[in-house]
Image (spheres, rainbow, N blue to C red):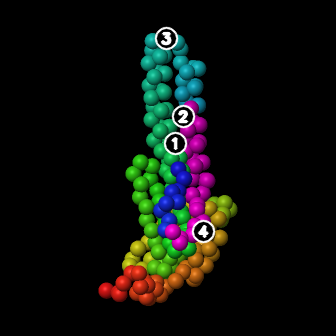
Amino acid sequence: MAFPDDVLSDEEELVLHLRPHWRASVAPLLVLALTVTGAVMALVLLPPTEGGRIGLLLVVAVMLWYGVRYALHPLLAWRCTHYVFTDERILLQDGVLARERRDLPLNRVNDHALHQSLLDRMLGSGTLTVDSIGEQKAVLAGVPDAQRVQSLLYELIEHSPAEDEQEDELSEDPALGPPH
């Protein structure tokens, strides 16, 4: 699923659009390969008798359940997860059928931390935790090229206007009327 551009405001510029690291799809792909292999082995090895057909149906049903539950669903979830960085905010979106979207304005971010295990460091991924004013926290798991993303986030935060500057601009805009 592509990220919808209509979510962005008119003056907002897309800086970076990411999905979780590709390694999140490795285990589901292995499970999918094992379920297909199990179904093919049952087809080849079970006898063509009435009992063999019942056994084949049972094996295929179990392999289908595991394939959907532990392979297709995680792959779809990975494909439908978006980390979007703009010049104004961070957008986090996930969900296959029911979608959840979360926005973190850059001017409210007060801390961001990167955690990388040894495997993360070897693959260049990591978990980026973004703390916001008001006890809000966003965890971006499996961010590809995590160190570059953290540096980019730092630059975006430094270049974003402060919250009180934006309020001053809004209060000075004659089209919006006097501040309340």
Q: Is residue 15 magenta?
A: yes
Neighbour tally class for label 3: few under 14, some 14-19, many 20 plus, Cα within 10 Å: few
Q: Tag 2's secondary structure?
A: helix
Q: Quadrant of residue 153?
A: bottom right
Instruction: Work out how far the residue at label 2 is from the one at label 1, CA to CA, in angstroms.
Output: 9 Å
Residue that numbered label 2 is attached to: 35
Residue that numbered label 4 is attached to: 15
Q: Is residue 144 magenta?
A: no
**What's under tag 1, amino acid-wise?**
Ala
The tag earlier along the polypeptide, 2 or 1, is 2
Residue at the far left: name it: 180
Q: Looking at the rendered structure, which numbered label has been put on residue 71? A: 1
The tag earlier along the polypeptide, 3 or 2, is 2
Neighbour tally class for label 2: few under 14, some 14-19, many 20 plus, Cα within 10 Å: many
Residue at the far top: name it: 49
Residue 48 pos. (x, y %): 52, 12
The tag earlier along the polypeptide, 2 or 4, is 4
Residue at 56% across / 73% down in the picture? 87
Residue 47 pos. (x, y %): 53, 14
